[in-house]
Amino acid sequence: MRQRTTRGILNCCAIWALLAVLCAGCVISPRRTINNNPSPTPTPVPGAGGQLYVTSGNSILRFSNAEAASTNSTPDATITGNLTQLNAPQRLLIDTNNDRLYVANTGGSSILVFDQVSTLTGNAPPTRVIFGSNTQLLAPVDMALDTVNDQLYVADRIQIVVFSPASLVNQNASPSRTIVFTALVTGMLLDTSHDQLFVSDTTDNLVQVLGSASLQNLIAQPTAIISGPSTQLSGPSGLALDGNNRLFVGNTTIPISITVYPNAATATSDVVPVAVFSGSNTRLALPGQLALNNGANNGELYVSDNSAGAILVFAGVSTLSGNIAPARTITSSAFTSALRGIALDTTR
């Protein structure tokens, strides 16, 4: 009965509140250049590679050589058009093993799945579309993939719905589990090695940690909560985890920042961050989805920032903190509106 009652309050007001959090500042501000040079020329990086996917309006842009991309970059492919079914897409999820891209298609109340995505361009239809009343999807915003148990987690309003098997789920499929929260879910991250789910709560300035994530069902049962003045959390949203089990959190309200917490598997309560990226040099204005390249020297952090009109790339993040400038700023004339999501594939 409690679950039915909780679902009953998920009305249009909640949906608009969630979109306001995720899409605040959707009009891209004028782009700033480096050292006042209006057309700086990117410096090629020998051996650089990778594919970077970016949502811009109702399109997905793919940049090859992502580990060297910089200002005035031209996408190598643009997935756009009526057949794509893209409608206000939010965050992206890349399955590198299968060259598969999942899209939280908020405006279409659906999840779009594109196979062989590194080869696609133009008006390409999705391979699968998860959509319909049985799915419980209304305004999906973020996703996580459990490659061990082949499960897809989708954050939608105040709940997370789980589909299994992720590799096959299609059309009007019912979720295998539903995890319900008391506030809007604005971001999430799954650590399969510890079977933990990290969930951002922008309203209450906290990150919930759900242990035994593969068994959680109905009302969320957090095993830890990162919260308190020492955490410096301020409207937490985007999440990422590096190879040293450090949790990166994008904070969307003043003071705008990226905060980093050690020992994510055991972090709880009023934990002090080991690093804070904040200040005018960072160019952080509205950090959205985060992506980490743990294979780069001391780690590279990619931050989609709609208000900055750019993807900000911070190098050496395992050793840095403070008011540091991005090592690279990826901009493009193809960024027409609403940089809501990014996904990084360093294997191609």
Image: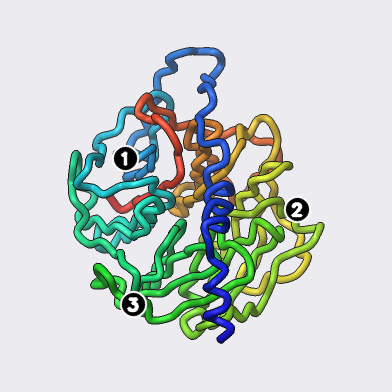
Contact between marks 2 and 3 (CB within 8 A): the answer is no
At label 3, the amino acid type is Ser
Query: Percent position (x, y) of residue 28?
Result: 50, 29
Query: Percent position (x, y) of residue 177?
Result: 43, 80
In space, the residues marked 2 and 3 are separated at their CA atoms by 38 Å
Q: Secondary structure at mark 2?
A: loop
In space, the residues marked 3 and 1 are separated at their CA atoms by 28 Å
Name the residue at the right extreme. 229
At label 2, the amino acid type is Gln
Sequence-wise first label, 2 or 3: 3
Residue visible at 57% across and 58% down? 14
Closer to the camera in the image, 155 or 41: 155
Which image quarter is the N terminus in?
Answer: bottom right
Q: Is residue 261 above or below residue 193?
A: above
Sequence-wise first label, 2 or 1: 1
Q: Is residue 220 above or below residue 269?
A: below
Q: Is residue 126 above or below residue 50?
A: below
- Residue corresponding to mark 3: 174
Residue 232's disc number = 2
Is label 2 or label 1 in front? 1
Colouring convention used in this rendered image of the protein: rainbow
Please rate how many residues cluster around mark 3, counting C-alpha atoms within 10 Å: few if below 14, some from 14 to 19, many from 20.
many
Sequence-wise first label, 3 or 1: 1
Residue visible at 26% across and 37% down? 78
Please rate how many residues cluster around mark 2, counting C-alpha atoms within 10 Å: few if below 14, some from 14 to 19, many from 20.
many
- Residue corresponding to mark 1: 59
Closer to the camera in the image, 108 or 296: 108
Residue visible at 49% across and 85% down? 215
